[in-house]
Image: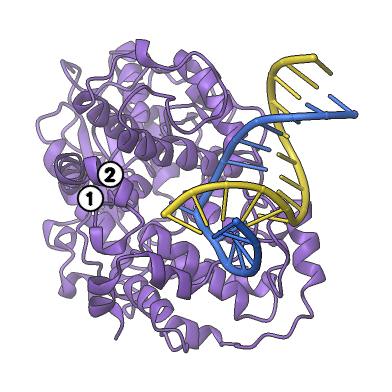
Chain colours: A purple, B yellow, C blue
Amino acid sequence: MKETPRIRVSQVNKAPVRRDGDFVLYWMTANRRRQWNFSLQRAAWWAGELNKPLVVVEALRVGYRWACDRFHRFIMEGMADNAQSFRNSGALYYPYVEMKKDEGKGLLRALGESACVVVTDNFPSYFLPRMIDAAGRQVSSCLERVDSNGLAPLDSADKAFTTAYSFRRHLQKILPLYLNGFPEPDPLTGFDLPVIQNLPDPITRQWPPATREILRADSAALARFPIDHKVGPATMKGGAKEARETLDLFIGACLRRYEERNHPDAEVTSNLSPYLHFGHISSHQVFSAVMEVERWTPDKFSVKADGRRQGWWGVGEAAESFLDQLITWRELGYNMCRFRDDYDAYESLPDWARKTLEEHAIDRREYRYSPEEFENGRTHDFLWNAAQNQLRREGRLHNYLRMLWGKKILEWTGSPREASRVMIELNNKYSLDGRDPNSYSGIFWVLGRYDRAWQERSIFGKVRYMSSESAMRKLRLKKYLERYAS
DNA sequence: ATCGGCTCGCGCAA
DNA sequence: TGCGCGAAGCCGAT
């Protein structure tokens, strides 16, 4: 079994590894996949070291904020995929789905009693950091968390970066150290260890595994959960299998036209962010697949760390642009959440942005909308309404329009603080990729994070302005509007 | 159609 | 200390 780079592993509590435990436990919370997964790789390595069975528990509870049919179905589709792909893998896969609030309480503690060591995922936003801390207090065996988030380990930086430019320069310096240390495509290859048929009786009685009927996640199954049923299932299907198909489709048909990504009608964006968010696919796998068609080898990596966006990897322009999204921008968001607990607060904005927004706090707002008017797409602006309709109905929002969407919320609410609250609520409630570090990057970019000052104007101050009129002028939107305007 | 100005912070060169 | 540069901005001049 291959080792996981030390920089990605940290111990959460002080308990020692218990050599006389019954199994090694992987508590899967963020990297919900069998493949390209450093956490699973670490757990499999421990199982090999200790010659013990490996148990993978993937849990879904009902009490998390914004729990709804949309996210529940997406996650359970992923669990059904995982149940399939762990079959005959040598590891026991145990999907646990909580049916009533707090029924799942105590499962991790109970598992920890018989585990040699518990490995879990390190994810830097939403409730997961707090959950991992709490787990460290509950688990009596050694608890490790593993960072499988990006090409650069979270701990390869020592501060929160404030511009994409400086973060890109940082990546250009440090990434060569990590390009040879990717996770194994299949960490269970050749896995030949003691097998465990099931968890101990008291555990399976109190916390029975999810049935196939539940994991089917059809409307009858979803109706049984005490979650928000008004946010209906998304059009995209969850799971590692669908994620790989989405990746193949993107590389086969869209990547070469990626320069057109800002035009909604071109439909060339990757649609990978929900899968990346729930861990149904790994950025290492996406990177490898892109580089394979680009026939890239590490020697094409630019030696100079100048922060430039193009000519860094030494591949085509379209691929360079996509990699900048996948790596620079995605990992910049993770970097922020890793180093700042206030990543979701107005106070985290750079000084110049807060200063200028506050100077314009008293400016007259020509339009003001309530949270409900925003939510239901009832503004005077039909392009904005279309974007909100797409978000509410499908759980996704086109990349470019997402920025415009936020800029208008800033313009049409009473204060920037209120705008940040409206954006966070709508985005986290409806978007499949909400609650992700990148959601917060997008929302706070609207208010000046990672950006520079521009010509001063009403309400926005020196924060970059955007308008639906110019979007209408320069983007191809006909099909998009037909689909979402009403 | 294209370009400079607007304006701030970073990191490197000097 | 100066300089070049930056996720998609707007505006007016040429």
Q: Is residue A12 visible?
A: no
x 19%, y 70%: residue: A221
Residue A73 left/right relative to A64: left
Q: Nearer the viewer, residue A308 or A324?
A: A308
User: Pointer 2: what residue?
Assistant: A280
Q: Position of residue A156 (x, y in %)?
A: 56, 24
Question: Disc 1 or 2, which lies upstream in sequence?
Answer: 1
Q: Position of residue A311 (x, y in %)?
A: 42, 26
Q: Is residue A406 above or below residue A228?
A: above
x 49%, y 16%: residue: A6
The answer for which chain carries disc 1 is A
Residue A327 left/right relative to A207: right
Residue A113 left/right relative to A10: left
Q: Nearer the viewer, residue A398 or B13?
A: B13
Q: Position of residue A4 (x, y in %)?
A: 40, 18
Say which amino acid is labelled 1: Gly
x 71%, y 75%: residue: A458
Q: Which mark is residue A30?
A: none
- Mark 1: secondary structure: helix
Q: Position of residue A181 (x, y in %)?
A: 38, 16
Q: Are marks 1 and 2 in contact (CB under 8 Å)?
A: yes
Q: Report how far apart the C-alphas of labels 1 and 2 lie in the structure.
A: 7 Å
Q: Is residue A379 visible?
A: yes
Q: Is residue A471 above or below residue A78?
A: below
Q: Do the residues indicated by labels 1 and 2 lie within the same chain of the protein?
A: yes
Q: Nearer the viewer, residue A467 or A348?
A: A467
- Mark 2: secondary structure: loop
Q: Quadrant of residue A332?
A: top right
Q: Nearer the viewer, residue A445 or A22?
A: A445
Task: State which quarter of the image contains the N terminus of chain A.
Answer: top left
Say which amino acid is labelled 2: His
User: Pointer 1: what residue?
Assistant: A78
